[in-house]
Structure formats: C-alpha cells, structure tokens
C-alpha cells in the first residue's frame, strides 16, 4: 500500500475508532489493522479489516428502517428517532448511500480507498 493511502486510512481509522457511534467490532478490527501495519500480517489484516467495515457500515435504507422501528425509539428516544429518520430521508434524497454518523462517514472514506489498500 502506498504511504499516502496508508496515512489516509490510518487517520480515518482513528476518526472511526474515536466516534461515539463506532461498534466494538469495528474498533477491534481497526486496532488489529493498525497493529499489523508494517508487519507480515498487514495484507491479511487489511482484508479482514475491509470485510468488517463492509459488514458494519449502515446502508441508508437500513438506517431509515431502524430509526422508524421500536428498536430505534429505544436507542434514540421517542423524539430523537423522528429526527434521525427525517435526516436519513433527507440525505438519501440528496444521494447518500450510507448513514452519515461520524463512524459511518469514516468507514465510507476508508472503503473508497479499498482498491488501493489491496494493491500489492
């Protein structure tokens, strides 16, 4: 992986891990990837990291469905869940494919570099 790609992905990985909305699995995968950078395990951990990020990023339609569900109301609260659903519909109408919370935004930025991350 080229140094500028590595630096960019490392920066976005830290942003993701520091986000309140980051899952424990994504944090663990991010840390495992950071720990593997520069070792013989880097390529393998990069593939595992990408797979975890692809599994964790929230597609916008899933966010809308969750925000409008009972589970969403339990997580966000009765009033906030309406705001989250409305916001998600707004960004979907503007072309968003994924949730724009800090963790998902960082993951989307990382995944945009997927091909470059996998280059030998």
Image (cartoon, helix red, strand yellow):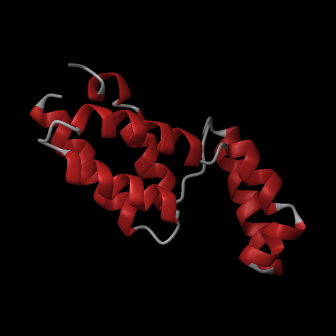
Give the answer, above or below, for where 12 lies relative to 45: below
Res 38 quadrant in image? top left
Residue 88 at x, y = what percent? 69, 53
Q: Quadrant of the C terminus?
A: top left
Q: Is residue 7 left or right of residue 49?
A: left
Residue 91 in the image, given as x and y percentages of width and height: 64, 47
Q: Which of 82 and 54 is in front in this view?
A: 54
Q: Which of 98 and 18 is in front in this view?
A: 18
Q: Residue at x 72, y 53 (%)?
A: 63
51 sits left or right of 29 in the view: right
Residue located farthest toward the top when viewing the structure as drawn: 120
In which quadrant will I find the N terminus? top left
Q: At which x and y percent is residue 100? A: 55, 53
Q: Nearer the viewer, residue 50 or 94?
A: 50
Q: Nearer the viewer, residue 21 or 40?
A: 40
Judged left or right of residue 116, residue 94 is right
Q: Residue furthest front?
A: 40
On the image, which quarter does residue 5 sit in?
A: top left
**Residue at 62% over, 35% down:** 95
Residue 89 appears in the rendering? no
Q: Is residue 40 above or below residue 15?
A: above
- Percent coordinates x, y for residue 107 in the rendering: 44, 46
Residue at 80% from the left image edge and 77% from the top image edge: 74
């Amino acid at each position: 992986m080229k140094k500028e790609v590595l630096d960019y992905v490392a920066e976005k990985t830290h942003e993701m891990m520091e986000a309140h909305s980051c899952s424990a699995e994504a944090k663990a995968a991010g840390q495992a990837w950071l720990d593997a950078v520069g070792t013989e395990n880097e390529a393998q951990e990069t593939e595992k990291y990408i797979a975890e990020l692809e599994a964790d990023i929230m597609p916008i339609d899933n966010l809308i469905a969750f925000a409008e569900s009972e589970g969403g109301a339990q997580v966000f609260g009765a009033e906030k869940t309406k705001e989250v659903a409305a916001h998600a519909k707004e960004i979907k109408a503007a072309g968003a494919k994924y949730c724009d919370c800090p963790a998902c935004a960082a993951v989307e930025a990382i995944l945009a570099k997927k091909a470059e991350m996998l280059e030998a």
